[in-house]
Every structure is written in C-alpha cells, then in structure tokens.
Amino acid sequence: MREKLIKFVLGLAQVAIDLGIVATFFTAFATVIAGICCLVSPRTFLGGHLTINLVIQGLVAVIVAALAFAGLLATHRLLDNLNRGHYFIAANCQALQQLLWLEIAGLIISGITTIWLRLVQVKPFVSFIVMTEDNFSDGIGFIVFLLIIYLIFKRGIALQQDADNII
C-alpha cells in the first residue's frame, strides 16, 4: 500500500513537471515572438519607445525561461529515475547538480538584473526577472536544500557501491 502511494505521488509530481515544461516552453516562445515583434516594429508595439532597457529585459526573460526549462527537464529525469526505483545512481546526482547550478545561475542573473533596474530606475516589464528580499532568501534556502539532498544522494551512491562490492 505504501509503495503504491509513493508511486502515485511521484506520478502526480511527474505530471506537474511535464505540464511545467510545456508551459515554460510556450512562455519562452511567446517572449521571443513578442521581442521580435517589438524589434521589428517598435512604433506599433511600444509606441515608438524601444530602448536598450527593454531589449535587455527581454533577453533576461528568455534566459530565465531557458534556465527554468532546463531545471524542469532535470527534475523530470530525477523523478523518472525515482519512479523506476533507481534511487542511488549517478544520473540522480547529475540531475541534482544541474539543478544546483541552474538555481545559482538564476539567482545571480536575477540579482544583477534587479540591481541594474534599480540603478537606472526602470520598472521591469515582467516581474519574474527581478528579485525581492523574499525571493533571495527563498533562493538561498532552495540552494541549501538541494545541496543537502545532493550530498545525501552522493553518500547513498558510495554506500551502494560498498554494499555491491561486499556482495
């Protein structure tokens, strides 16, 4: 019963991640299309006010969406392995390590963008590229959480290899 419940919960998480992958892909695609439209015809879409600030914000939005997409793919691989019963394998550590680096990169990019926007006193056109105090502390907390999980999996792999060598 417990095993079925775990598989069910992991299956639901897998579906949610898959929906997130599709949604993130379409969001990034729409952002790129909107950016191209604004570059081609700024008078129509922006009232003639195409500035370097908007171009940079568009690029940052695409980069953040790409990081989110890559993170969702890594999470998908991790959940897929867990659903198959492969817990302490190198692929899981690689997925967690990828998630760690993506989160660090996202935190740095959002932090630099936030500082830049505040220095030039420009309001962001999309809210997910800037960081508040809560976002920063949540990001740091998530990085620490991922690091702990990564170390647990890494230790689990070492113990699994030791156990396999004994047998």
Image (cartoon, rainbow, N blue to C red):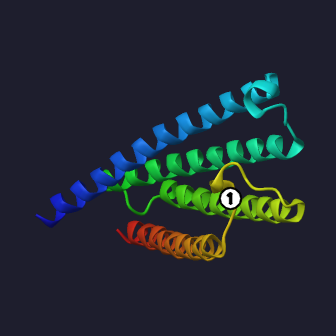
Of 45 and 156, the residue lying toward us: 45
In this view, the residue farthest toward the left is 1
Please give left or right for residue 96 compared with residue 19 in the image.
right
In this view, the residue farthest toward the top is 40
Image coordinates for residue 132, horizontal then vertical, percent? 66, 70
Picture residue at 45% right of the left edge, 58% below the top? 89
In the picture, the quarter occupied by the N terminus is: bottom left
32 relative to 1, above or below: above
Type of residue at label 1?
Gly
96 relative to 71, above or below: below
Q: Secondary structure at mark 1?
A: helix
Occupied quadrant, residue 37: top right
Q: Residues within 10 Å of mark 1 (few under 14, many from 20)?
A: many
Which residue has dot 1 on it? 106
Picture residue at 68% right of the left edge, 55% below the top? 129
Picture residue at 73% right of the left edge, 32% below the top? 35
Image coordinates for residue 67, horizontal then vertical, percent? 64, 49
In the picture, the quarter occupied by the C terminus is: bottom left
Please give left or right for residue 88 compared with residue 132 in the image.
left
47 relative to 165, above or below: above
Q: How many marks?
A: 1
Occupied quadrant, residue 139: bottom right
Of 127 and 161, the residue lying toward us: 127
Please give left or right for residue 84 compared with residue 120 in the image.
left
Image coordinates for residue 56, horizontal then vertical, percent? 82, 45
Picture residue at 44% right of the left edge, 74% below the top? 159
